Image (cartoon, rainbow, N blue to C red):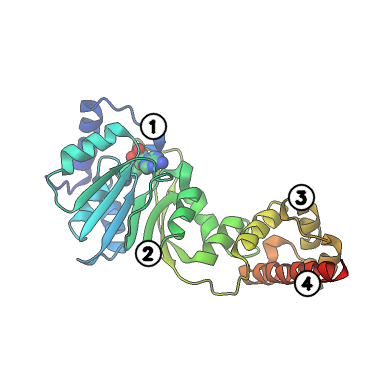
Amino acid sequence: SIFYSITQEVSALVRSLLKKYNIKGGTFDQHFLVDTDYLDRIVAAADLRPEDVVLEIGAGIGNLTERLARKAKKVIVIELDPALVRILHDRFDGVENIEIIAGDALKVDFPEFDKVVSNLPYSISSEITFKLLRHKFKLGILMYQYEFAARMVSQPNCKDYSRLTVDTCYFADASILMKVPKSAFQPAPEVDSAVVKLVPRPAPFEVKDQAFFMDFVAAVFSQRRKKLRNAILNTNHVLKIPSVKEVVARLPEDLMNKRAENLTPEELAQVANKIVDLKKSILAEETKEQ
Ligand code: SAM
């Protein structure tokens, strides 16, 4: 395939392919990154080595794909829209190190990969990120809606600090590499975007029961402005902590008087761990009594 190195060329290519294949765009979050400066900076951030296998989710017409394939051992793309899959085959079937998987990235089994580099479909940002984080990989360079990225990398006591911040922090180091304006895309989206660098690592604090920790974080952030004590009591229909009043009374008082939005991920983990321990000892006491 010909390499499209300047923005006008990529932009013209997008226009002509969409017309030729009769694609309207707009559905399935289809906004194609045409600004070659950003395309090149994303590829540079991925720091590709000749041995790297790269996963790309939502390849569109392949603007990013062709750049990744020039540096990596292999690029595996997953694309949902059959019309775009046809374009990708027409463009890249002769290219040995590009593999195309047609399907929904939320449903297909991911292949093994070293790095994931994608301009993600924004409506599935959260689900796709946590699906990715259940896999082993070295580095992610991922484009999100700016507001979403800001929530991923926030800090306690900030308005963007949320369930997403804590869950992200549990799985990976995350940082925003660059803000990307609407004008870098075709058609332009309604929101600004940002590229996030994700480096998966073991959690920097102990979590005794991962499933409970995740449920706990979701529950207390659904009541982010309530003191933790009340947030736990109010959400116990979901958390299902036995003898919840007794448990809450035995949790560290200083933390119980704070709000979820003021607690660090580590403090939230401490409380969740303590609940897990108390649940066990209450169950043990109950069985002894019977
Ligand atoms: N990577 C291309 C680029 O930068 O120009 C396109 C990015 S566009 C924001 C998102 C792409 O994801 C679209 O091509 C869309 O068809 C595809 N897509 C949307 N939902 C998807 C899903 N569930 N699984 C796989 N691809 C999806």
Labels 1 and 3 touching (C-beta < 8 A):
no
Point out which mark residue 147 bears.
none
Locate residue 60 relative to residue 5 in the image: left or right: right
Residue 32 visible to an observer of this rendering: no
Answer few, some or many: residues within 10 Å of disc 2's Cα (few below 14, many 20 plus, some between 14 and 19).
some
User: Mark 3 or mark 4: which comes first in sequence?
Assistant: 3
Amino acid identity at mark 4? Ser
User: Which residue is denoted by mark 1 in the rendering?
Assistant: 26
Residue 16 visible to an observer of this rendering: yes
User: Mark 2 or mark 3: which comes first in sequence?
Assistant: 2
User: Mark 1 or mark 3: which comes first in sequence?
Assistant: 1
User: Mark 2 or mark 1: which comes first in sequence?
Assistant: 1
Indicate whether 253 appears above or below 192: below
Ligand 1 within 8 Å, label 4 CB: no
User: Which residue is denoted by mark 4 in the rendering?
Assistant: 281
Amino acid identity at mark 1? Gly
Gap in Å between the C-alphas at discs 3 and 4?
Answer: 21 Å
Gap in Å between the C-alphas at discs 1 and 4?
Answer: 54 Å
User: Mark 1 or mark 4: which comes first in sequence?
Assistant: 1
User: Which residue is denoted by mark 2 in the rendering?
Assistant: 137
Gap in Å between the C-alphas at discs 2 and 3?
Answer: 36 Å
Mark closer to the observer (1, 4):
4
Mark closer to the observer (1, 3):
3
Q: Secondary structure at mark 1?
A: loop
Measured as percent of width and height from the top left, residue 124 is found at 47, 44
Measured as percent of width and height from the top left, residue 227 is found at 78, 60
Q: Quadrant of the N terminus?
A: top left
Q: Quadrant of residue 32?
A: top left
Locate residue 95 relative to residue 171 in the image: left or right: left
Ligand 1 within 8 Å, label 1 CB: no
